[in-house]
Image (cartoon, helix red, strand yellow):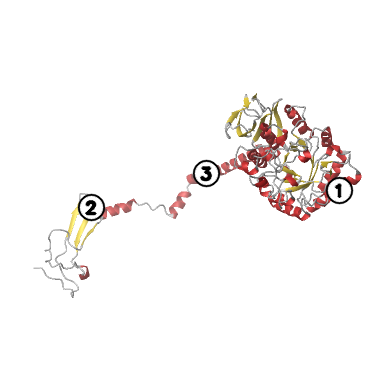
Amino acid sequence: MHSRLNPDSCLRTHGTNRLTLDMTQDKVLDMKDVELNEIDPEKQPMATGAEDPPVGGGGEKNGVVKVKLEDEDDDDSNRAQKFTGLSKEELLKVAGTPGWVKVRWALLILFWLGWLGMLAGAVVIIVQAPRCRPLPVMEWWNKGPLYQLGDPDTFQDSNADGVGDIAGIQDRLDSLSTLKVKGLVIGPLHATAALSDAKFTEIDTKYGTVDDLKKLLEAARKKSIQIILDLTPNDGGSSSWSNGTAPELLNNIKEAMNFWLDFGVGGIYFNGIESIDNPGEVLEELRNITANHSSDGKARVLLTSAIDPLSDNILTMLNDTAGGLLTARYLINNDNSSEGSLGNRIKQYQQVASEQDWILWAVRPRLGHMASAVHEKLLRVYQLLLFTLQGTPLTLYGDEIGLKDLPGQPAASSPYMQWDDSKNHGFSQGEREIKPNVNENITFKGQEDNKDSILSVYKRLSELRGKERSLLHGDFTLLHQSDTSLAYERSWDQNERFVSVVNFDPDMEISVTITHANLPEQCTVVLSSNSERKEGSSISLKDLKLVPGEALLLKHPYSG
C-alpha cells in the first residue's frame, strides 16, 4: 500500500537507497545509479488522478542520477605520468657541468661569427654595388612641355566680343593642365604701334588689363603652370628687330624685361633672333637679366627662336651663348629637302648643344601649325620626336588636336581654337558666328575619349616624359638612321630605357634592324600609331617592319 507524501514533513523515507555497481575486467566503475530517497515537494510530479506507480515498476524512476567514477588505481597512474620539470636547484646543477659549459660557449661563438659574416657581406655588397648617378638640377621648364598660345585673340573669348583675351586663357586652364604643360607662352600683348613708340610695359586693351594678367598668373601658378611673355618687337603683326638691334630699342626691351619679371612672369620669349646684330653678345645681356631675377627658388627662363628654322646663325649663336638660354631647334626641313635628312640635323643639334643646359624642340613652318607642315600620317611621328628627344617640347596651340592653318599668309592664317561642338566650337558665345574652316570636325572634347586620337597620344607622351627619368633627363644614343627611318635610345643610370623608332615615309612600309652593345634582341611595346601592335607585347628588333608613318616607342630594362 502506498503512502501519500505529507507536504508538512521535512523528510520522508521512500524505500532504501539502491546502488548498483557494474565493474569490468579492468576494474573500471562505469556508472552508479543512485535513487534519491528525498524528494523536494516542489519538484514532485503533479497528480494526474491515477495512482502512483508501484516502487520497482518499469522505466526510470524520478530522481535517478547517473555518475561516472574513475578507479583510484587509474588516478594514481595518471598522476605518475605527469612531468613537472626540473627544480631550480636541479637546473643550476646541470648547467654547471663541463659539457653544458662547452656547448654554451660554442653556440655563443657561432652566433658572433655569423653576425660578423653578415656584416662583412653587407659591406662588400655596398662597396661593390654600382653608384647611383647624381640627378641633374631640374627647373620647371625642364619637367614638361611648353604651350605657345601666340596672339590670344584666337584662343578663347571670355566676354562674347569675338576676340580672344587674357581672361579667356584663364577659363581654359583646366583643359591645359590635363596636357601636363609647365608653361604658357603668350603674346605679344603690347600694342602693334611703330617700334619707335612701342610701349612694351603696357597691354593692348583688346586683350584685357594688367589686372587680368595678374589674375591669370595667380590661377596658373596654382596649377603649377608658369606664364612666359612674348616681348618680340613687332610692326604691324610681323616680327621685326628694325633691321638690326638699335640701342634705343634694345634699352626699351631690357626695361620691359625687368618690369614683367618683377611683375611675376616666369620667363621672356623672343622670336626672329637671326636678324639681331651681334646676336651672341645681345642674347648674353638678355640672359643675364633673367638670371638676375632667378632667386628665392623662383627660376626664370629666356626662350628664343628664329623665323627661318634653317638659319645658320642659330648654330653660331648656340656656340657663342652661355648656358641658361633655350633656343628652339626645328624638326622640319625646308621645302627642297627630304624629311630623311632630319636624323642628321638632330644629331648635329645634339652635338652643338652638348655643352648647354637644355634644348628646346619645335615643329614650325614659319610660325604655322604642325598639321599644316607635315603629312597627316606623320603627326604622331613628330609628336613622338618632340617628347622623347633630349630637351623640352614647344608646341603651338591646337597642335595637340591636329589643328591646321587657314589659307593665306601666316599673319592672317591663325585658326580659332576649337574646343567642342557648341556654338563657334566653344571659342566664343558672341552673336557673330565664326565661319567653319578646314578644322570643322576637329575639337578638343571630341578627342578626349578616343585613346587613338592625336590628343590622347599627346597626353600619354607628356605623362611618360614627366615621370620616366630616362625620358626626362636621360642620355641620347643614336641607334639607326636612313633616308626614311630613325631610331634612338634614351637612358639614365639603372632606370628603364626607351627606344624611339619612326618611319618618315607616309606611303611605304619599311624594315629596319636595330643593334647596339647594350640593346637586347627584344623590347616591350609602350605605344604605337599602328593599331595592330598591342601595348605590353614583346617585339624583335631584327627585321622590324614599320607601317607607313609609324611612330613606335619601346622599352627595355637596365641590364648592367
Q: CA distance from mark 2 to mark 1?
A: 121 Å
Indicate which disc, 1 or 3, sits on the residue closer to the N terminus: 3
SS of the residue at dot 2? loop
Quarter assignment of residue 455: top right
Q: Note whether 417 is above or below 59 in the view shown.
A: above
Indicate which disc, 2 or 3, sits on the residue closer to the N terminus: 2
The residue furthest right is: 247
Quarter assignment of residue 335: top right
Identify the mark at residue 107; answer none if there is no mark: 3
Tell me if mark 1 has few (under 14), some (14-19) or many (20+) residues whose alpha carbon lies within 10 angstroms of its own: some
Q: Position of residue 367 (x, y in %)?
A: 77, 38
Please identify, in this view, whether the residue under mark 2 or under mark 1 is nearer the observer. 1
Question: Which residue in the protein does label 1 denote?
Answer: 198
SS of the residue at dot 3? helix
Choose between 91 and 17: the one closer to the eye.
17
- Is any atom of residue 161 visible in this view? yes
Q: Position of residue 156 (x, y in %)?
A: 71, 48
Q: Amino acid at mark 1?
A: Ala
Identify the mark at residue 28; answer none if there is no mark: 2
Please identify, in this view, whether the residue under mark 1 or under mark 3 is nearer the observer. 1
Choose between 481 and 291: the one closer to the eye.
481
Please identify, in this view, whether the residue under mark 2 or under mark 3 is nearer the observer. 2
